[in-house]
Amino acid sequence: MPLSLSPSTSPPAASNLEATPKGPDKASPIIHLSAVGKRFGNHQVLADINLSVHHSEVVCLIGPSGSGKSTLLRSMAFLEEYDEGEIHIEGRLLGWEIDDRGRRKHAGRTRLNQARRNLGIVFQQFNLWPHMTALGNVTEALVRVRGIKRNEAEKRAMEVLDKVGLAEKAKEYPARLSGGQQQRVAIARALAMEPKIMLFDEPTSALDPELVGEVLAVMKQLALEGMTMVVVTHEMGFAAQVADTVVFLDQGSIVTRGTPSEVFRDTQHPRLRQFLQNYLDRNAFWHTTTEQEN
Amino acid sequence: MTFDLSIITANADAIWNAFLVTIYTWLAGSVLGLIAGLLIAALMLFGGRPLQRLLRVFIELVRGTPFLVILFLVYYGGPSFGLRLGAITAGVVCIAGYSSVYFAEIFRSGFAAVPRGQLEAGECLGLGRLQLMWRVQLPQMLVLILPSIINMLTILCKETAVLSIITVPELTAVLTGIGTRTFTFIETLLVLCIAYLLLIEITSRAGRWLERRVGTYLQR
C-alpha cells in the first residue's frame, strides 16, 4: 500500500504554481543556501544544507522534532547564526561579511537589515506586542522603519488586516483575540512591509486544532497569489496541497526532497516512510472504527 | 501632658518651606536616579563585558554602603576631591546615586521579563535596538516593575529625612529643630509623621491608579 497523505484530487492552483514560477528573475534563486551548517557545542544541529528557493515557490520543511527544521528556517532570517556555509537572500550574503583575509565577521546592523528587508517572518508563538492593538502591531514598523506617516500607515495596515479577515478587530489588543486571530495579525504585520519572501516557523503548532484552518487558509491564499514561502510545518495536508517542494530533514540534514507526490506517495526512503507512518497512525482510530462497522 | 498646636501655626511658613525642600530633594533625586538607573540597566544589557563588570562593581559598592555614609562622603569628603556642592544639591545627588543602582536592578529584571520572541519579531521588521527598547520593552516592563518602583519611591521619600544631618533644611531638620528649641516634641513629631504619611499615601495611590491604566491591555 502506498503511503498517501495528499488528497485524491490535487488542487489545480498548486500544480500551476509548480509548473510556472512567476517573477522577474525566475532563473536565479531568491534564497540560496550552500553547505550551511551549525553546531551548538558538540551537537551538529545543521549539516551541509543545500537549498534553493525560487520566486513564487512554496517550500515546506518537514521532519521530526529536533531535526533542525526550525533552526534552518530561523537561520534564513539570521535569528540563528549559521557558522558554516553561506545563505544568500536575493544575492546578498546574510548576516556575515567576509573580510580581506577571507575570514567571516558579523555584518553591521544596516547590512543585516538590508538583507532582511524583503523577508517576513511568522513565529510559532505569534510574538505580537501585547501592549499594542492589532492595528498598532501592524502599523509600528511602517511608521518607525519605513517612515510612513501614521494615518497613511494605518490605511495600509487596515488593508492588510482586511486581507487576513480581521479588519473589524483592528482596535483589539492581542489578549482579546483567539490564537488563530493573533497569528493572522502576525501575518498581517509581516505582510504590511511588503516582503518578497515569507518564512513561517510552525505557524499553527501553538493553536487549538479548531483554529488551525483559518491560518492555513490565509497562507494558502498567499501561496496562490505567488508569494515565495518557506514553511516549517507539521500539517502534512497543507504541505501536500500547497507546497511545490517538500524537504524532509532528519538529524540536521536534508534526507530527501521532492514534489509532494514524490515525498508523500512514492518515497521509498525508510526514515521518511517511518516518519509519515506516524502521521497515519495518529488517524488509526478512524480506520479501526470503519473496520468494526464492516 | 500639654498639646499645643499653636507652635505649628506660628512656624507655618518655615514648615511649608521645609515641606517643599523635602519634596524637591525627593523628586529631583528620584527622577535623576530613575534616569541613571535606566541608563545603567541598558548599558549592562547592550554594553560590552568590561563595561558590564564595571557597572556591576559600582552597583555592589553603592548597595554595600549605608546612605548616611554616602552622604558624608559626598558632602564632607567631596571638597577633598574638588567636589563642592551646596547641602541641597549634595542631597539630590546622593539620593540619585543611591537609588540609581536599585532602580537599575529593577529595570534589569524588567528587561528580562519581556519575551525574546517579541524582540526577534521587531528585529526582523527592521526596528533598531533603541526603538525596540523604547516601544516594546519599556511600555511592557513598566506594568511589571511599577510596584517595585513605587515601593522604592516611598523608601526614598523617607530617606530624605537623613539629609537633615548635612544641614538640608527639610522637614525633619526644621521640625525637630522647632521641637528642641521650644520643647514641643509631640506636636512637631506628629506633624512630621503626618507629612510623610501624606506623601507616601499620595504616592501609592498614584501608583495604583497608574498600574490600572498601563495594565489595560492585559484585560481579556
Image: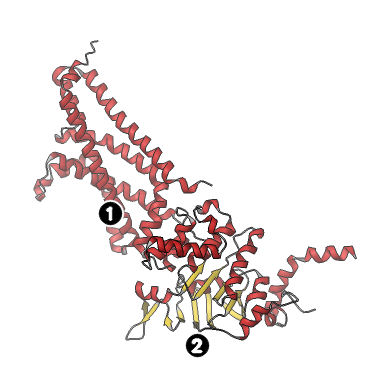
Is label 2 or label 1 in front? 2
Give the secondary structure at mark 1.
helix
Q: Quadrant of the N terminus of chain A?
A: bottom right
Q: Are marks 2 and 1 on the same chain?
A: no
Q: Which of the two residues, B131 or B167, is positioned nearer the viewer here? A: B131
Asked whether disc 2 touches disc 1, contact meaning CB atoms under 8 Å apart, the reply is no
**Amino acid at the residue labelled 2:** Ser
In this rendering, the answer to whether A282 lies above or below A229 is above
Question: Looking at the rendering, which quadrant does residue A249 occupy?
Answer: bottom right
Residue tagged 2: A28
In this rendering, the answer to whether A56 lies above or below A135 is below
Q: Residue at image x 25%, y 45%?
A: B98
**Residue B66 visible to the viewer:** no
Side (left or right) of B108 relative to A13: left
Question: Looking at the rendering, which quadrant does residue A60 occupy?
Answer: bottom right
In this rendering, the answer to whether A149 lies above or below B178 is below
Residue A258, label in figure: none
Residue B57, label in figure: 1
Q: Quadrant of the C terminus of chain A?
A: bottom right
**Amino acid at the residue labelled 1:** Val
**Residue B202 visible to the viewer:** yes
> For the residues marked 2 and 1, what is the alpha-carbon distance in whole angstroms?
54 Å
Give the secondary structure at mark 2.
loop
Q: Going by the picture, which residue comes out furthest to the right?
A: A294
**Chain ID, mark 1:** B
Q: Which of the two residues, A196 or B177, is positioned nearer the viewer here? A: A196
Side (left or right) of B133 relative to B196: right
Q: Which of the two residues, B134 or B52, is positioned nearer the viewer here? A: B134
In this rendering, the answer to whether A166 lies above or below A226 is above
Side (left or right) of A86 relative to A209: left
Expressed as whole percent of the image width and height from the top left, the position of residue A62 reads 62, 74
